[in-house]
Amino acid sequence: MAGGSGSRLWPSSRSLFPKQFLSISGSDTMLQATLSRVCFIDSNISIICNDEHRFVVAQQAQEFGAELNSIILEPAGRNTAPAIALAAFDALESNSGESAPLLLVMAADHVIEDVAAFHAAVEVARVQAEAGKVVTFGIVPESAHTGYGYIQRGAESGNGAFAVSRFVEKPDLETAQSYLDDGGYYWNSGMFLFAADVYLAELKAFRPDIYDACEKAYLGKSRDVDFLRIDAEAFKACPDESIDYAVMEKTDKAVVVPLSAGWSDVGAWSSLWEIGDQDASGNVSSGDVLSYNTSNSYVRAEHRLVATVGLDNIVVVETNDAVLVAAKDQVQDVKKIVESLKAQGRSEVSQHRHVYRPWGVYDSIDNGERYQVKRITVKPGAKLSVQMHHHRAEHWIVVSGTAKVTNGDKEIMLTENQSTYIPVGVVHALENPGVIPLELIEVQSGSYLGEDDIVRFEDRYGRAPKA
């Protein structure tokens, strides 16, 4: 499951490029790290994500080398119970075996440090799932954490698994400490293993409205390039509900398998401090960081030098267009900043200066009232749509690589230090015919420079005629 906006990890995580697509802990992105954990269990992998993230998902899976069974696109977020139902319908349709396939359900934005321990827990859960149980993974708690829900275990179900006695909402500190002292409670990880048909049967029994909406949406599916699109109208009519409320708290088939594997859902910047390599002063640093008389802090520099002096229990996160400074024990409230940005209509809530497209990426490096400058990178063999603009002209200067340019009725080849001018209203296109990335500078000028001033005439990525 690769949906979600990751708002608590702003400013690194934005709604159009949330945390699951970032390299938060290690060189791989969180999505790629998740693929790495599961590819040794089974190569039959599907990802369900928001429609607006589809090209990022496809690109990161391709870079990792994963051949996916499906990339299922959600036209709107409806929480985990409907998302898993779509995956279950798809698994049953694509399965050719005699028995229903098992679904290992994971979020793409979790950290698991001990992969071997995770694989061992999956094998314990597999036995339970094959016996018709609905299995969840309970994280053996390391502290009295108030940011997670808890699972109380009941009688042993065999092979190290336990029946679920009850699910508990996020507790206060005193209650969380009592759970830790008791020893029979686990953090709720949000990971599951069950047979696809068992899950759908339980969902139909307890929430037939969700089941019916998802079935209707899946039956109205269509293929679009590399993606599986479901019926948008039917899915938007589906209730918004988590699997915990829809199924897990109601079924008598719930089983919990304990997991102690260095797990974190990276729900806030303090989580990165908790799982990071702390120096002698208790600091975790990432990027070009210099610290003096600083302790117990997390400092992340993504684009420039960040220096700290005399800080304690502070989080500092620098990106190329925003800086966050917060008390480490209040980072859950970063979402309040995100809410303010939304209310003000600011672009920093949704996208970075770097904006990813199916053909590559652009970086808005400067702008003014009637101009904007972008650095554009086009992947080898990729092509931007054949398009025109009503309100802006464009100058293109090639920095490296080779550009194949359609400019009105002319087609030209440009190499390093060569340029062209696209007047307002002229149909144009840009393509990289080479084997190395094409780098160019684009200078836009005109009365309106918004990304929605695009009329597409042809697009190999199936995007709409308007931006």
Image (cartoon, rainbow, N blue to C red):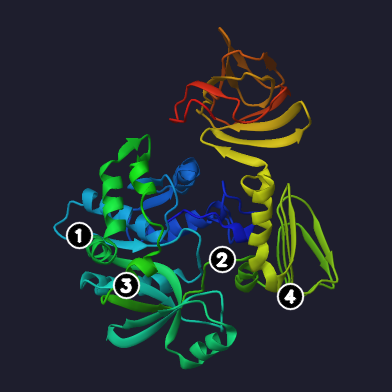
Looking at the rendered structure, the secondary structure element under dot 3 is strand
Q: What amino acid is at disc 4?
A: Asn
Which mark is drawn over residue 296?
4
* Residue of label 3: 135
In the foreground, 441 or 93? 93
Q: Check contact, mark 1 vs mark 4: CB within 8 A.
A: no
Does label 3 or label 1 sit earlier along the sequence? Answer: 1
Where's residue 177, x and y in %?
55, 88
* Residue of label 2: 266
Give neighbour class at mark 3: few <14, some 14-19, many 20+ (Cα, 10 Å).
many
Separation (CA) of disc 3 from disc 1: 16 Å
Where's residue 139, x and y in %?
45, 77
Q: Check contact, mark 3 vs mark 1: CB within 8 A.
A: no
Separation (CA) of disc 1 from disc 2: 33 Å
Looking at the rendered structure, the secondary structure element under dot 2 is loop
Looking at the rendered structure, the secondary structure element under dot 1 is loop
Q: Is residue 143 above or below residue 404?
A: below
Q: Is residue 44 visible?
A: no
Where's residue 317, x and y in %?
72, 59
Q: Is residue 354 left or right of residue 381?
A: right
Q: What amino acid is at disc 1?
A: Ala
Q: Is residue 213 left or right of residue 22?
A: left
